[in-house]
Each structure stands twice: as structure tokens, then as C-alpha cells.
Amino acid sequence: MPSTKIQASRRLSILCTEEIDSLFSLPHFTEGERHIHFDLSPDERATIDAARTITAGVHLVLQLGYFKAKAQFFVVSLDHVRPDINHILTRYYPGRLISEVGPLSKPTRLSQQRIILELLGYRLCGGDEKQALMAFAQRAAMLSTQPKFILREVLEHLTTQRTVAPGYTFLQDMVSQAVIDERKRVTGKLDASLPDNLQQSLNTLLHADDKIHLINVLKHEANDFSNKELRQEVDRRKQLAPLHTFAQTFLIDATLSGESIKYYAGLVQFYTVYKLRRMDASTVRLYLLCFAFHRFRQINDNLIEAFIHLVGQFDKQAKLAAKAAMLQASEEATSNLKAAGEVLGLFVDESIASDCPFSAVKERAFGLLEPAAFPSVTNYLRNVAFDRLDYEWSYFTRLSPTIKRNLRHLFCDIDFAGRLEDAPLVRAISAMQTLLRQNRSLRKADPSNFPEAVIPVVLKKHLYVESGAGAEKPKTLDLLSAGR
């Protein structure tokens, strides 16, 4: 893989300087690390002892320790590695001086590299190995086209295969080529299968309408769960829906991984519209399709989260209102107990004639206790439990306009599914969505078409009304209440 000035200017910037140094630069050991990396096995010690000169022996220990640390070979300047040489002399050549250690000739250095490879069971990355490595990088690119991921996979593969990694520039060019090949593979499939109308939709994303690019509008995320922000999210979802529907099938057929989709989508976020317009059209369409797919799902998650949050908020408000009403009813009943006792005293009041009309007694009772206070005091004296659910449902009725304004458009736009396709809840949601999406009045809907099995027993008294005549007075589902 030749390296040219043009290639160098266009090489992917995969790792930062610190990461490159940690992999390929000369190691700098602490004293503790020297004891570990310059420790020799019996076979290694025998090989060192066979060296003809102290220069050859010290360099062999030095390169062996560096290779154990980085699996790389280095051409070193003796001045830069004096602490390491001093450690080796003290440990393996006691009494010998550093001045006795000279530079190593190239033939001897290459010979020592072959010795180290044989001792540690490694091999160099030659022509055949590089071709195999390129094929491995292309397979890795199918899992994720993120360059750093491919490079890490390649380096891990080299370690597993006990192969010395080639230079960083070679790896940069190889990863870049793998990314390009994978992108060409997918863009070729996309060009062959993308309908004209969707191609136009993708092109439109980069066009400006009133000096605002549509892609920038779609990039905008909701700041909160306010009605205005969520309606804009719903609009963005509808704009992306046709592209998402196509992408769902295409990206699977193209075997594009989730990581690659996220990576390509991220490039749309990273590059400016001007930069995207200057890129290859097929490449940009792939980026935009991945963006549309990823952004649609992101919006979908936001809408679901908002729906759950708002339902929870309304439910919480209703429970708090019911709790407050229960407390108020209890306080009112307690405060009216004295008056209630005086009302009961009327029944044993000897000043009231036995033939006195009940209306007169009732009038005196209302003078002692307000008529509106009688139900709460009566329930209190009879120890009747406060119907919290009844009050919660009444609160939902009063809150109905707010619930409709904030939840109905989300309910209509979100796609619901269950583990069992024909489950009562799924059928109930489908029936409600069909009515609401058609803007049909719930009053005019046929209750028999609504799956009533989903309604809990505790809610039935709030959702059914008496209908018809006769002694039995049959009850039917009140769809207006059900749709609140």
C-alpha cells in the first residue's frame, strides 16, 4: 500500500498523539517495570549468554524487553536508553561499564530481531500477512465503519495471531481503504434500490427554505415536553417516516450494522451543509439515509418518553387532588360533628310535638347543619371509606381538555405493539387510534367494536352508563368517557 504526499494529507486521523505513542513509541520504563520486562527465561538467558560481545548481549536484552512491552522493534540511540542499559549491566553483566557497550550494526540488529521472533513465537507482517490483514479489516468494517473500531480490531487480531504490527501509516491507509470499500459496497446497493421519490426527499434535506436548511430543522431536538415542542417533534417524525420505512428494509438487506448506521448518521451532525454538498452524491445519500433512520428512532424514543411522563404527571395530579379532597372532606366532617350531634338531638327534643311535620324538623336541622355538609358527615359517622378513584376519575373529566391537547396527538402518532398481537390492550389501542386518526367522533362510534375486555373491573362504573328501559336497565360502554 504505497504512501504518497496526497495520501498523507488525506489520511484518517484515527488516534491522538498519546494513543499512537502508547502503541508505537519507544517505551520508558520505571525501575519496577525494568525488573519485569528485562526478566529472562532460561531459554532467553541461554541465548543472551551465547552472544559473542557485550554490545550484542546488551542490545539483545534491550530489544527483547522492548518487544515484550510493545511487540515492536526499535532503532535506539544509546544516550536515550542509558537507564535501561545500566539496569541490564548491573543485573546480567556485573562489573562491566556502559562505555563498553557500542552501537549495533544493521545486519546484527536484524539477526537479533529474528532471534526474538523465534523465542517469543511471533512473525513479521509480510506481504501475505498484509493481504490477509486487509481482508480482516474489511470484515471488521462491516461490523462498524468507525475507524478507531477497525484499528482496534486489527491490532487485537495481530496480537492473537502473534504478528508484529506494521507501521501506523500503513494501518491508517489500510483502515481508510476498508472504510472506503465498505462505503462503496453499501452505496452501490443504495443507488440500485433507492426509489426516485425518496432520492428526491434525501436531496431536499440539503436545500434551503426561507434560508433554513431542512436538515438543520430535523437536527433540532425538543428542549422540553411542552405541547409546542412535542408537536414539532411529531412533525419531524412524519417528515422522516417514509425514509425510515425504506431504511428499515434496506439497511438490513445491506447488512449494515447498528454501529455503522450511528457512525454515518453522526457524520451528518458533524459536517456542515456546505461540506455535505461538496461530497460524492451517493455517499451523502447514504449518510442522510442513516441520519433519517437514526433521527426517526431518536424522535420516537423522545415521544414515547414524553407520553409516559405526561401520563404519569396527569395521574399524579389526580391522586394529589383526590388526597386533598379526602383530607378536606375529613376536616369538614370533623368540624361539623357538633352540629351533627345537635341534629340528632332533634329526635329526642321534648319541645317538638310528636305530630310535628317532618318538613318543620328538616328545616330546623338545616338551620343547624348546611345541607351540603350532610353527605360527608353521614359517611364519616357510618365509617364509609372515601372513594378516591371516583374523585380521581372526576378530576380526569375536568382535566379532559388539557389531556386531549397534550396526549391525543402523541397517542395517534406513536406505534404501539405487544408480545401478543391480538391481546385486548393492543386491539383497544388500535380501535382508538383508528377512530382518532380519522377524526371521527367517539360519540358516533359503535361500542360493540371496542374490545371491552381490556377495561379493569374497578373502572367499569366510570365507563358504563345505563341505556334503554326496563327493570334491569342494561349498561353500555360510554365511549366519550373512555376516550378522555
Image (tube, rainbow, N blue to C red):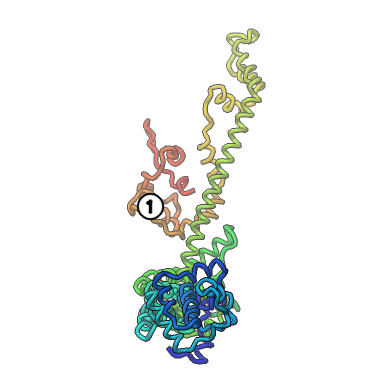
Q: Amino acid at mark 1?
A: Val
> Residue 246 appears at what percent x and percent y?
39, 72
Snapshot quadrant of residue 131: bottom left
Q: Secondary structure at mark 1?
A: helix
Q: Residue at x 49, y 92 (%)?
A: 4
Query: Disc 1 designates what residue?
Result: 426
Vertical side of 259 occupied by 357: above or below: above
Q: Residue at x 54, y 88 (%)?
A: 9
Crowd tier of the residue under label 1, counting other residues whose Cα lies within 10 Å: few below 14, some 14–19, many 20 or above: some
Residue 162 falls left or right of residue 216? left
Q: Residue at x 53, y 40 (%)?
A: 392
> For this rendering, which residue is in front, 333 or 104?
104
Vertical side of 254 occupied by 1: above or below: below
Residue 151 falls left or right of residue 334? left
Q: Is residue 215 visible in the rendered structure shown here?
A: no
Q: Is residue 24 visible in the rendered structure shown here?
A: yes
Snapshot quadrant of residue 187: bottom left
For this orientation, the residue located farthest to the bottom is 5
> For this rendering, which residue is in front, 5 or 209?
5
Query: From the image, which quarter does the N terminus lie in?
Result: bottom left
> Residue 140 appears at what percent x and percent y?
39, 74
Residue 16 falls left or right of residue 479? right
> For this rendering, which residue is in front, 51 or 63?
51
> Residue 136 appears at what percent x and percent y?
37, 77
Vertical side of 207 occupied by 386: above or below: above
Snapshot quadrant of residue 362: top right
